[in-house]
Image (cartoon, rainbow, N blue to C red):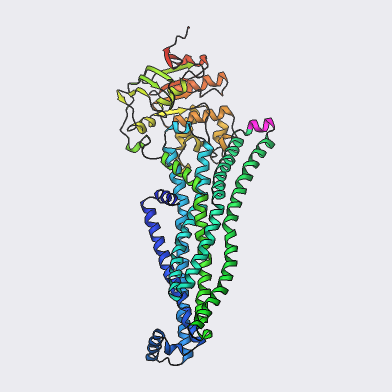
Amino acid sequence: MFQVLKKLYEILDGPERKALYAVLFIVFVIGVFEIVGIASIIPIISVMDDPQVLEDNKYLFIYKQFLLNVGIEKTSEVLAVLAITSFTMIALSTALKSVGIYLTTKFIELRRHSLSKKLLSGYLRNDYQFFINSSTSDLTKTILSEVDRIVAQLIRPIINMISYVFLLVFVLTFLFFINPLVTGLIIGVFGLLYLVLYVGIRQKIKELGEQTVSANKGRFAVTMEAFTSIKYLKFSGLEHYYTQKFEEESYRFSNSVALQFVFNQIPKHIVELVAFGGIILISIVTLISRLGAGEQAAGTIFPILGAYALSAYKLQPAIQAIFNGIVSLRYGRVALDNLFKSLSEISPDFPRAKDKSDSIKVNFNKYLQLKNLSFRYANRNVNVLDDVNLIVGANSRIGVVGKTGSGKSTLINLVLGLLHPSDGQILVDGVEITDSNMGAWRQLIGYVPQDVTLVDASIYENIAFGLGLDDIDLEFAEHCARAALVDEGLLNNSRDKNVGEGGAKLSGGQKQRIGIARALYKNPKLLVLDEATSGLDPNTEKLVLDSISKFSENLTIVMITHRYSNLEMCNEVYEMFDGKINKWSKNA
């Protein structure tokens, strides 16, 4: 349990920990006011039952003398002042509790915001290889679902548990001074009851936690798989298959959450029964003890029973909240471990490119050199690229051909800085590209993949990807679109019309041309085309490539292609085979 609390504390940053201390302080003050409110009831009941207590009790006698000095003499008036004082204390406690609820809720819900943001930001700043080795549905699940679960089913119950611990300690201390025997009996009975309940369900709660995490992972995986495969899914009539797969995981998830809630609530009703019996038992024990002391039982038992009754009213939700918190620690441990693991994966130790504003400037006026470049993926012994040497002159047109799996995409990913060389160097005008200048290097590159990703926005927003419509240079964006031969009809009617999710309203060729326009909008010095025109017919493809070549005199083009007809525009062509690169003759 303490390990879970420690992990929860460790995922908070400095300002969040200060906010937590502030919340706990407010909770502590609320506990003080709660106990004062409970204590203020006893004098009222005592005076109502026996006015003589104003003379016999030294504290009430001093209070009465104070009131006499301000002109309050009658017992009824003293009782009224006591009632007003008690009401004021309880009202202050209620008002403070409202403030506490606001601050506590705000603290808890903002952790949903900060944890989700921290995860997304951290994931996006990780190396590209991290995403190669990760499941997109898992990452999405962690950010959107697991964080919600941890907030709702772990952080909130635990914060409530801690706040009620303060109240429990204060109330039990107060009751201990009234009657140590009865208070000790309360602690023993309720402590033993909850211990038996917890021991009985702790293993089941752990299993439910594991099952919930597993089923939630399955829900996201099936949903992501269905939507990303929607075209083939519809074609193959697999709607029922995916619905059934989702149903299985969704039922497991919902059933686990329901059972966890039931296990949290069942003790509440058992405790209500025990508490009712406890009040009767306390009445009998107190009556016997008073009679044994030779006191008038009826004259002294009512104030004490009133204090115990009000304390029971306050303690019942407190004890239940503490139990819920302990169960939640057990139930949410697997989800918290996964979150903790995810946060550790985005630690500052991971290599990442600096922001372009912080990067060392890179000039590309002479050449790009790949020197003794080798690459192998983590946990693999075989090089995907093996001692590659290549010089690309500025303003040249380079073609790269090769069979699938020959290393073409890996080569491009290294040039783009998405992967880091295992051995060797990438040099630009003699300067090695490292994390310190990667941001500046990427600013010089325009990249068009085979599968262009479009967002559900206008064509212009997709061309100037990452900018709002008000920040886009529409004239230059249109110039880039025309250079990529984007259809005139699309341009003339596209400012306020969205292209659909993933460009669903466009053809494959239209999407690729928008992707080319996007790369040109960066006004790059190096344009990398990775099968970027494969969705175009040969005639249109030739026109687009010719237009791109004329876009800028200072544009270097590296083109990956499987169509040998595209190589006519290239100054030099290289062929890749088994991770090695060799110059290729057009006449070969």
User: Start and end of the magenta stretch?
Assistant: 231-237
235 falls in the magenta region: yes
Residue at figure coordinates x 41%, y 25% from the top left: 414
Front-most of residues 11 and 520: 11
Front-most of residues 563 and 76: 76
Residue at figure coordinates x 42%, y 19% from the top left: 385
Among the 4 quarters of the image, the one containing residue 575: top left
Among the 4 quarters of the image, the one containing residue 553: top left
Residue 535, horizontal then vertical, whole percent: 56, 24
What is the tally of numbered marks visible in this picture? 0
Residue 13, horizontal then vertical, whole percent: 38, 50
Residue at figure coordinates x 31%, y 23% from the top left: 429
* In-image side of 288 versus 573 (left or right): right
Does residue 574 appear anywhere in the picture? yes
Compared with 83, 485 (above or below) is above
Residue at figure coordinates x 58%, y 59% from the top left: 265
Please identify the dominant SS of the magenta region.
Answer: helix
Front-most of residues 256 and 546: 256
504 falls in the magenta region: no
In the rendered image, the residue lying farthest to the front is: 292
Residue 131, horizontal then vertical, whole percent: 47, 33
